[in-house]
Image (cartoon, rainbow, N blue to C red):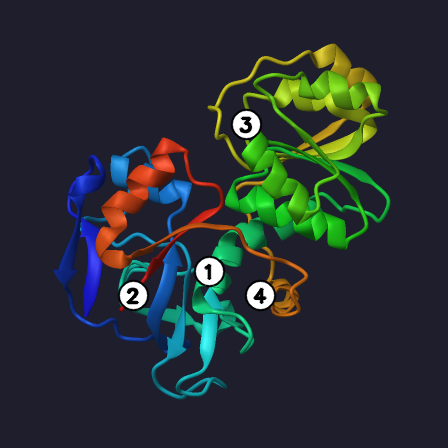
Amino acid sequence: MKAVQFSQYGEPNVLQMHEVPDPTPGPEEVLIEVKATTVNRLDLFQRAGKRPVPHLPFTPGLEAAGTIIQTGHGFQAGQRVLTTRAQSVSGGGYASKIAVPTSALARIPAEVSFEEAVAVGLAGSTAWGSLFDLGHLQPGERVLIWAGSSGVGSIAIQLAKQAGAWVATTASSAERAAELTKLGADLVINPRQQKVGQILSEAGGVNLVIELVSSTLQESLQACALEARIILIGNLGGQEATIDTQAWRLKRVTVVGGGQLRTSVTNEEHMLALVADKKVTPLIGQRLPITQAAEAHRLLEAGTVQGKVVLTHA
């Protein structure tokens, strides 16, 4: 089979296509022919050596959508599936075939394309986990979702609206703001021109913050109402932040670190059903063949793409 790998850490051009042996499924695994995957921030960090991988050469790809190659373990050959847990010893979604535990497979409805499935996949799983599994979002609550144009942010906006919440988000341009308003955002704030924390505090505050930037943690605290929750799931702005602990203490805000967050396969299947019903639309910023994985990395690093970068296998 073919797989895009890196044999050394470095710039995007270290990503090269190689011919590698087919993976051998374990006792509880099935073999999948991969049709689509995505580029995630962790892929960039791994390739650059900022998050060292267990071995070289290494095949990136945290998620994958494709078809079952051989019937087994309750799945039929040809069945369309998604996994947000694609990386294993045999490699990740940048490979044309992967072996995946059946417990990690979500079934894709007929109305959902492979590209849509991976675009909602890990981003949606993280969004669901932060909003509901950790954030315990309730109907009628107010939520701030940072980086609304990101894969996680764009799905979180829609899931929060489906749950009956009022949603504020951030975008760095009028064009991006218009797209997020279409997705359902009630208020879009440009953090380059406006003070997010002040605007939301003066409007009564929010009950929940999905913090994807990290360096904006003080703004998030300012935006919070009394006894709000902040779920820290990303550090797009860096790993350090200076905060006013007095405001944190007096507001009794709970800050939860999300880690590498995924929800259950059952919830992932529920999200795919929402996509099939046109209630959630994954935001796909760019589609490229897997042979252009290096270019896909450059696009994500440049920060010019709104939504997910999807890679397709021939």
Q: Which residue is mark 1?
A: 118
Cβ–Cβ under 8 Å for marks 2 and 3: no
List x then y, in percent, for residue 194: 65, 17
Give the spatial CA distance, label 3 vs label 1: 25 Å
Give the spatial CA distance, label 1 vs label 4: 14 Å
Give the spatial CA distance, label 2 vs label 1: 13 Å
- Position of residue 6 in the picture relative to residue 45 (left or right): left
Picture quadrant where residue 2 is located: bottom left
Give the spatial CA distance, label 4 vs label 3: 33 Å
List x then y, in percent, for residue 109: 56, 75
Q: Please report whichever mark, 3 or 1, sits nearer to the chain's N-terminal start.
A: 1
**Circle on res. 172:** 3
Q: Which residue is mark 2?
A: 313
Q: Mark 1 or mark 4, which is nearer to you?
A: 1
Crowding at label 4, few (<14), some or many (≥20) Cα neighbours within 10 Å? some
At 39% from the left and 72% from the top, the residue drawn is 66
Crowding at label 1, few (<14), some or many (≥20) Cα neighbours within 10 Å? many
Picture mark count: 4
Q: Mark 2 or mark 4, which is nearer to you?
A: 2
Cβ–Cβ under 8 Å for marks 3 and 1: no
Give the spatial CA distance, label 2 vs label 4: 24 Å
**Circle on res. 265:** 4
